[in-house]
Image (cartoon, rainbow, N blue to C red):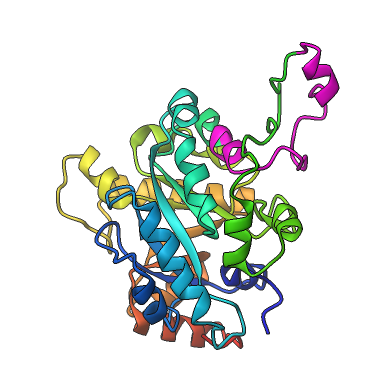
Amino acid sequence: MGHRINRAIELLEAGQAIYYTGHHTGHVLTEGQGRIDAGTWADYINVGMEHGAFDMAGLAAYLKGLAESGPTRSGHRMPAVIVEAPVNGIDEANVRFNAWQFRQILARGVHGILLCQAETPGAVRAFVESCRYPHHTIGTDPALPTPLERMRGAEARASKGLGLGKRGRGSEAEAASVWGVSVAEYFACAEPWPLNPQGELLLGVKIESPEGVAHVDEILAVPGLGFAEIGPGDLGLAFGDVALRLDPYRPELQEAREKIRAACARNGLAFLEVCSPANICARIDEGVRVVAGGNEETARIGRAHQKRAMPV
């Protein structure tokens, strides 16, 4: 049996690459589809809501189908589910104004969220804080006022590190039932990994604009992230290229790719990239640990390359 709720985190902890299926739009979010997808070859399922429908009722039904059709062959209750949120991470104000979307997504019982269009560290800090409960303090500024001091009017802003979590009570019972844990256990482990080593939430960012690439070192230094990716589609559009060119990238995107990959390595984050059967072994050797592309053959080759023991 898996020793974690989130199979993707368990594999990343072991140094293994993880493989996902699911697209930016068009995902069928029904209980029946969840029952079908429970047997997926992938390590996690990406649900695209940046461009796909923001369907919370459908997401709840889908997760119910996944949970009730488990366990997976690896012994986990269900494959991990990570949602691409329809929030642009262009600045802190934008993220804080739209943080209700993170609360809604997490309330359904997902295992992670991807913030698209990440461009500033302030936006990413607001994203992480929005996904955390305030009783968790790992990574927060030690100079923050205590709750009693805040109640008496002290300013609650952090000068460094993270501020306090903004996620509130109210959805924990629904999310805990999807995870198959008690409410108390959910409150304890619904935390971003690896910031909290016991956390079961995998938070990521997509760097897909010239501004995001320019600030990638500061962005990926924000505590609470588990992975980051290059967004070659939108980044290519910024250079006037409507064709999706992946292997090889155009020179400007290759430069961005190397900068993002290096920043991931410096900050201990998994690097996400589209891979194919032809390049997966080389990409793994370069440090890619989250594999896009939705190709089962890519996963088969990559798993064999790393001599992976965990069954799918």
Residue at 72% x, 52% y: name it. Answer: 187
Q: Nearer the viewer, residue 96 or 123?
A: 96
Q: Is residue 182 above or below residue 207?
A: below
Instruction: Examine the image and state in which quarter residue 22 appears.
Output: bottom left
Question: How many marks do you count on the picture?
Answer: 0
Q: Nearer the viewer, residue 300 or 74?
A: 74
Q: Residue at x 52, y 43 (%)?
A: 103
In the displayed structure, would residue 85 be above or below residue 21?
above
Q: Which residue is at 49% across, 82% downward?
A: 69
Instruction: Let me know if residue 148 is in the magenta part.
Output: yes
Residue 74 locus on image (x, y percent): 59, 85
Assess whether residue 221 is covered by the magenta stretch. no
The residue at 54%/38% (across/down) is: 127
Q: Where's residue 257, x and y in %?
A: 40, 51
Residue 265 at x, y percent in the picture: 59, 54
What's drawn in magenta, residue-wise? Answer: 125-154
Q: For the stretch drawn in magenta, what is the main secondary structure?
A: loop
x, y percent for residue 38: 45, 79
**Quadrant of the drawing holding the N terminus:** bottom right
> With 61 as the anchor, is 237 left or right in this view?
left
Q: Quick check: can you spot residue 291?
A: no
- Vertical placement of residue 2 versus 202, above or below: below
The answer to whether 264 appears left or right of 13 in the picture is left
